[in-house]
Image (cartoon, rainbow, N blue to C red):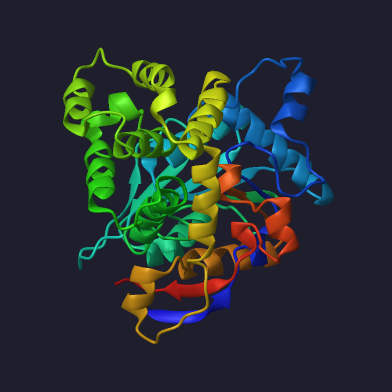
Amino acid sequence: MSISTVGSINDFLHDNIVYRNLIPYNKTLPSFVDYMKEKKDSDALLPRKTELLYAETITYFLKEAHKTKNKDIKNLIYIGDTLMNDGGAFQNIIKYTNWNGFCYICDEKNEETNDFSLINSDYGSIYKSNHWNNIELFKKEILYNGVHFDASSVLLIDMDKTMVGARGRNDKVIDYVRLEAAQMLLTQYLKIDKEDPLFIEIYSILNKPLYHHFTKDNQDYLVYISLIIRAGLFNKDEIFKSALDKNYSLDKFIIAVENLQENLSKELHDLHSEFFYFYNLGDPTPFKEFRKSEYIATSQKFIKPTSSNKQKILDSQIVITGEVYNFAIEAEKSGILVFGLSDKPDEASIPTKEQMSNGMLPLHQLSTAVIEGGI
């Protein structure tokens, strides 16, 4: 394993990336709202990654961004880390466009066995691997199938746990950052130490699949619930017990908080009111203050190496996946349009205007270590 350099994923993206709100950071490109106006469907909700409308929208972005090229798009190359989300999005795009498609899905394992295999797919060719350096084998497969590295192809890359925080190699840092962001709110709104063991216990228990029907596996909801319980509004054990009942819903919990809001401190009352407002609007990321904290906590993990110990860097920083970086740089130099996708909310990825005026940058523009090679 070696550190290649310090770089930014924007070295190959050039701001061609969309976060959860589907508003390309490259402002020369239209947004999801623009696409819906064109379709005369202004009531459509933001789609998630595995939905067909997401595939339609991303295709629209790719075609708009590709207009400067001198060839039509014939091939889609996709790099991600999950079969369900990334593999699903890839297949939907191929189904919608009928392009030639090649997808690489990796989850690195600390083992000597080498898995690089073609899996069954109704649309396009999907290769799964347990080592990120097998991306070179993936490239050979693409070339073997007659696809040229030129402007007739587009390259889509998932950001989280693929471009940065590679799954199986560096992803635990991304997971920890979410807890760290939640802990920042403890000091700000509950006036208690961020290392408070009771909050960590509540968060950790509710973060398990057993409670996903209650938290909807949504970090906004999970952090909000954990913060309210830690504030003492409810007995934690009673909530844990109630949440095991499939009939006990997040809606019931939030209504209970609304009915008891006079028992909250002013700071927490205001926090709840903002959450309640966005939740009722149907916003999938209603906990704006948490997401702002997540941006700060995440950006602090994008730093130049402070150690020569590579494993220490992987355990403490968010780094760029060297194999993906090299693949994307080569593709971009060959005339391929490179486009980034992220499920991360915009509020957790892009600084506010005030933060930007203080020199803070969106996550895709931040520099950090570029590391390649298996553990």
Q: How many numbered marks appear?
A: 0
Q: Is residue 212 above or below residue 66?
A: above
- Position above or below: 144 against 97: below
**Residue 91 vs residue 72, the one in the foreground:** 91
Q: In which quadrant of the rendered image does the N terminus lie? A: bottom left
In this picture, is 326 found above or below 282?
below
Residue 323 image position (x, y, % from top left): 47, 68
Horizontal and vertical percent position of residue 106: 37, 54
Residue, x 48% and y 32% (percent of image)? 269
Residue 336, visible in the rendered structure: no
**Quarter of the figure with residue 249:** top left
Q: Is residue 357 left or right of residue 76?
A: right
Q: Position of residue 233 (x, y in %)?
A: 31, 30
Query: Front-most of 278 and 172?
Result: 278
Residue 233 in view, yes or no: yes
- Please give left or right for residue 319 compared with residue 61 in the image: left
What percent of the width, then of the height, locates residue 241? Answer: 16, 24
Q: Quadrant of the C terminus?
A: bottom left
Point 23% across, 26% down: residue: 239
Please, which residue is most extreme toward the bottom here? 308
Locate residue 112 relative to residue 347 in the image: left or right: left
| Vertical position of residue 214 compared to residue 162: above or below | above
Q: From this viewpoint, which residue is outermost toward the top?
A: 247
In percent of the image, x 72 and y 55: which residue is there?
A: 354
User: Residue at position x 51%, y 66% from top?
Assistant: 300
